[in-house]
Amino acid sequence: MTFHAAAALIAFSVLQIWLVSSAISAGAPSAFVITALVVLLALAIPAARAIERHWYHLSRQALASWGLHARFRRDVRRLWAAALFVPIMWVSGAMAATDAIAAIAN
């Protein structure tokens, strides 16, 4: 799980940075989007660490069961789905909020 957590965090960060830089070049206020990036990364790192720690303790306890492999695969799928879809939804929401604030201000 350590490999998956580390790789998912890297993929998450690269995708998030790419989306934020695209949003800034499209005209979004850089301060708002950068703040959104920092907040999301501050939430993603502890979440990935908690998943990794959970599976580390399971592996150290050597809890072998037929359902353990299925739970591992489920957690890996959830981790990667979150790493790939949360940045897209977050930046889309940040852009929509920025547009709404700009519309209200004008």
Image (cartoon, grey):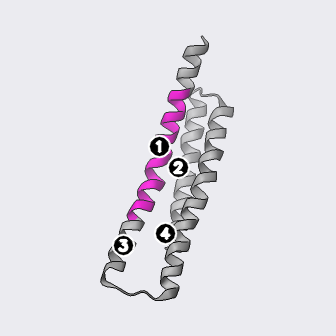
Q: Compared with residue 100, is residue 49 higher up or lower down, i.e. above or below?
A: below
- Among the two numbered marks 3 and 4 on one chain, the one whose residue lies closer to the N terminus: 4
Q: Amino acid at mark 3?
A: Arg
Q: Quadrant of the C terminus?
A: top right
- Among the two numbered marks 2 and 4 on one chain, the one whose residue lies closer to the N terminus: 4
- Among the two numbered marks 1 and 2 on one chain, the one whose residue lies closer to the N terminus: 2
Bin the neighbour count of mark 3 within 10 Å (Cα to Cα): few under 14, some 14-19, many 20 and up.
few
Assign a secondary structure to mark 3. helix
Task: Tell me the number on the disc at residue 62.
Answer: none
Q: Amino acid at mark 1?
A: Ile
Q: Amino acid at mark 4?
A: His
**C-alpha separation, residue under disc 3 versus residue under disc 4:** 14 Å
Task: Indicate the position of residue 13 as horizontal and vertical percent values.
Answer: 57, 53
Task: Tell me the number on the disc at residue 4.
Answer: 4
Assign a secondary structure to mark 1. helix
Q: Compared with residue 68, is residue 20 higher up or lower down, i.e. above or below?
A: above
Task: Tell me the number on the disc at residue 88.
Answer: 1
Mark 3–mark 4 CB contact (< 8 Å) = no
Q: Compared with residue 28, is residue 43 higher up or lower down, i.e. above or below?
A: below
Task: Tell me the number on the disc at residue 15.
Answer: 2
Q: Main secondary structure of the magenta part?
A: helix
Mark 1–mark 2 CB contact (< 8 Å) = yes
Mark in the foreground, 2 or 4: 4
Residue in the picture at 46% in, 41% down: 89
